[in-house]
Every structure is written in C-alpha cells, then in structure tokens.
Amino acid sequence: MKKIIYTLITGIMAVTLTACGSNDEGKPSNNSKEQTETAQTQPQDQEKQMKEMQKKLDKQKIEEKQTVAIINDEEVSGSDYNMVLSSLQMQMQQMGQDPTSDEAAKQMKEQTIDNLVGQMLILQEANKKGYQASDDEVEKQIAEMKESYKDDNKFEDAMKQAGLDMTTLKNKTAENIQYMKYMEKEIPVGEVTDEEIQAYYDQAVQQGSSDGQELPKLEEVKPQIKQQLEQQKQQEQLTKKVEELKKKAEVDIKI
C-alpha cells in the first residue's frame, strides 16, 4: 500500500502556505547582525543548486487548465494536479529523497492521479449523501490558517507564492469540510485493542534497540500509538471504499 493515499487538497494548501510562512520567518532580521552575516556568506553555489532543483520540479507540473481526468463526467484540472504534486515533492524532499529522478517522477505522477481520483470519488459520494459545508465553517477554517501569519499581507503573499487566490481557497476548504464530514460519519475509526497496541510497541522497541535508541515506557506513549493505529484502520477502510466506488465509476485519465 502506498504511504500517502488520497491527500486532501486543502491539507496540501495548508502545507504549502505553512512552508511559505516558515521561509519568510526564517529570513534574517534587521536586528540580528549574526544572522545577516550568515546569510551574506552563504555559498552562491548552494543557492544555484536550489534554483536548479526548483526548475526540475516545475517541469513535472502541467498546464493549469489541462484536463487531467474525467470522473463520472466531472473534470479534474491541472491546477489541482499541480497542488497535489507539489505536496508529494515536498514530502519526498523532507524524507531525504530526490524527487527529480525519473523513477521518482513516475511514482509521483501515478500517486498524484490516484489521489485525485480518490478525492473526487469521495466528494461525489459526499454530495450524494448531502454532506455540505456552511459559509461559517469555511470562514472559520481559513481563519485558523491565517493564525500562522502575523498579518493579512503575509497570508496573501503566501497564497500568491502557492499560486492560490481566495476563491480557490474557499472552494477547496469547503470540499475539505465535506470530505471530513463524510469520513466522520461513513468511515468510522476502527477499534484498537490493547493487544494491538502492545504488538506495535514491542516492534518499535525492537527496532529502537537495533538502532541504539531507548523508547519511553508503554504507558507514556500508549495514547499516541492508539491514535496512530486508529488512523491506519480508518485509512484502510477509506481505501476499500474508494476501490468499491472505482468499480462503479467512469474514470478517464487524460495524461
């Protein structure tokens, strides 16, 4: 099973916006002489490498208005594809892997399409069952995103860097709320037993021992392990649901 399945577009935007905000906060301040000197002495070749990397990543993207797929008569656009792809590229970099290799590019393309198809099928099912997002719910979630920024201008700058406008953000946020409401009601979290928690912990201890690490006592990490296992079980149920929907759906991939 793939590690990243059906990533929410709004979640992707949140990651992108946060990254933009973090980059902005990471710039040296005028009041810090040490930070300024460090920035000035940064090797130029490192900056060049970063630009070259970004060029290669951008080449993996497609035209925003291009049709990626038609799913039950609904089109998936290139802009949605690029947002999902950008998130996967970022996650791969965070794991210390090269997202620009031919193998990685092929893998990310397949995974991006798989994610988009899964998202669309779940959203279509959510619409059929009447799950909707109110304007107040959308505004509240966007307000929570803004809290990561000092002011509205910083937030708007981050949106521009992420290639977003407020209309798109509101639409995708509404879809995210629909998605989560559907998940909560239709894809229940599976029950996790003490035996499963113990087995998970024992495996982690064994792995930690081989790496020379000492893990906390079970009682200290039991809530986190339970949550992790619940998420895994819910993800498995979601995957099964999407596979069921695919069998009845008309899916035409265009790229």
Image (spheres, rainbow, N blue to C red):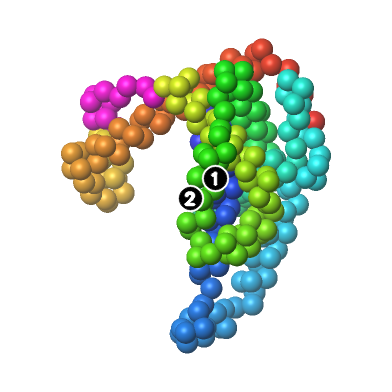
State which quadrant residue 105 falls in: top right
Q: Tell me which segment is drawn in magenta.
A: 189-200
Q: Work out whether residue 50 or residue 177 is closer to the camera in this orientation and state it.
A: 177
For image coordinates 56% across by 33% down, the residue present is 133
* Picture residue at 55% right of the left edge, 67% below the top: 24
Query: Around disc 2, counting alpha carbons within 10 Å, would you say few (fewer than 14), some (14 to 19), or many (20 or more)?
Result: few
Which residue bears the numbered disc 2? 144
In the rendered structure, find residue 139 and report the number of the disc placed on it.
Answer: 1
User: In the image, residue 104 lies at what x, y percent?
Assistant: 64, 44
Coordinates of residue 119 in the picture (x, y in percent)? 61, 30
Residue 15 highlighted magenta (yes or no): no
Question: Rounded to the nearest whole Å, what is the CA distance between mark 1 and mark 2?
Answer: 9 Å
Amino acid found under the numbered disc labelled 1: Glu
Q: Position of residue 166 (x, y in %)?
A: 66, 50
Taking the view exactly as shown, the residue that stands out farthest to the top is 248
Question: Mark on residue 41?
Answer: none
Mark 1 or mark 2, which is nearer to you? 1
- Which label's residue is closer to the chain start, 1 or 2? 1
The image shows residue 208 at horizontal and vertical percentages of 29, 45
Q: Quadrant of residue 81?
A: top right
